[in-house]
Structures are given as C-alpha cells and as structure tokens.
Amino acid sequence: MDASQFNIRDALGRWLCPACGYPDYAGDPAYDRRGGLAGVTICPCCLWEPGFDDDPAASERAGATILESLRRYRSGWGAAAPWAGRAGEAPEGWDGALQLRRLFEVAPHVR
Ligand SMILES: [Zn+2]
C-alpha cells in the first residue's frame, strides 16, 4: 500500500486528518510514498499523530499497517466522535460525526 493515499484533501484543497477528517489538519501532507513522514502534525481535533499512532513500536493503538492503526485509533477516539483537543478550541458548530462522514465520502479507502 502506498502510504501517500493517507494524505487526503477535500474539494477546497485542505488536508484532512486521516483519522477523524478534521479539515485544517496540516499545511503539508504527512506521508511520503514509502510510508515515511514528510511532515508531522498532531491533529488538533482527535490528536492523531503520524509516525507515533501508526508506529507499532511506539503506540499501543498502532497496527501492522497505517489503515489498521487508523481503525484502532478511531475506536479509541470514540463512537460519539468527541473533540479530543484543547477545551474550547472546537470550531463553532463543530460536529465530529458529520466530519467523519465527510472524510469517508472523500476517502472511502481509509474507513
Ligand atoms: Zn484527527
């Protein structure tokens, strides 16, 4: 699997967090084609961190693949898709479940 498939953009060109779909995740794509890291950003919404939460040696939530790690991470994040970042920093009207649905519409392969 080409790791760059986990660099996901929406129609407005924003990079989406591959775990929760947060739309202002990073200024640069996180993964290069071989699974290495081009840029590391901790998601302000769900706290996903490429290179840590997908690294079996570092994170208990990591799986053998990035996709497996994303799935495990989401199950830890919670079915209710809560804001896990700093209190009070969720955007006005933020809806985690809607954000996740939009992620899966744009990138069904990361579900
Ligand atoms: Zn996220």
Image: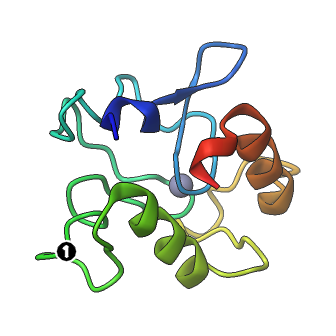
- Spot the residue most to the left: 57
- Spot the residue most to the front: 1
In the image, what residue occupies the spot 44% across and 57% down? 67
In the image, what residue occupies the spot 23% across and 28% down? 32
Whether residue 80 appears in this view of the structure is yes
User: SS class of the residue under badge 1?
Assistant: loop
In the image, what residue occupies the spot 36% across and 53% down? 42
Whether residue 30 appears in this view of the structure is no
Q: Above or below — where is 107 with respect to 27? A: below
Q: Write down the quadrant of residue 66 in the picture.
A: bottom left
Q: Quadrant of the N terminus?
A: top left
Residue 86 location in percent, x, y? 52, 66
In the image, what residue occupies the spot 66% across and 37% down? 107
Name the one closer to the observer, 53 or 35.
35
- The residue where tag 1 is placed is 56
Q: Is residue 45 left or right of residue 97?
A: left
Q: In this view, does 27 lie to the left or right of 98?
A: left
Q: In this view, does 40 lie to the left or right of 108?
A: left
Q: Above or below — where is 65 with respect to 79? A: above
Q: Write down the quadrant of residue 105 in the picture.
A: top right
Q: Above or below — where is 24 with respect to 51? A: above
Residue 74 location in percent, x, y? 57, 71
Name the one closer to the observer, 35 or 37.
35
Residue 58 location in percent, x, y? 14, 75
Q: Is residue 56 left or right of residue 89?
A: left
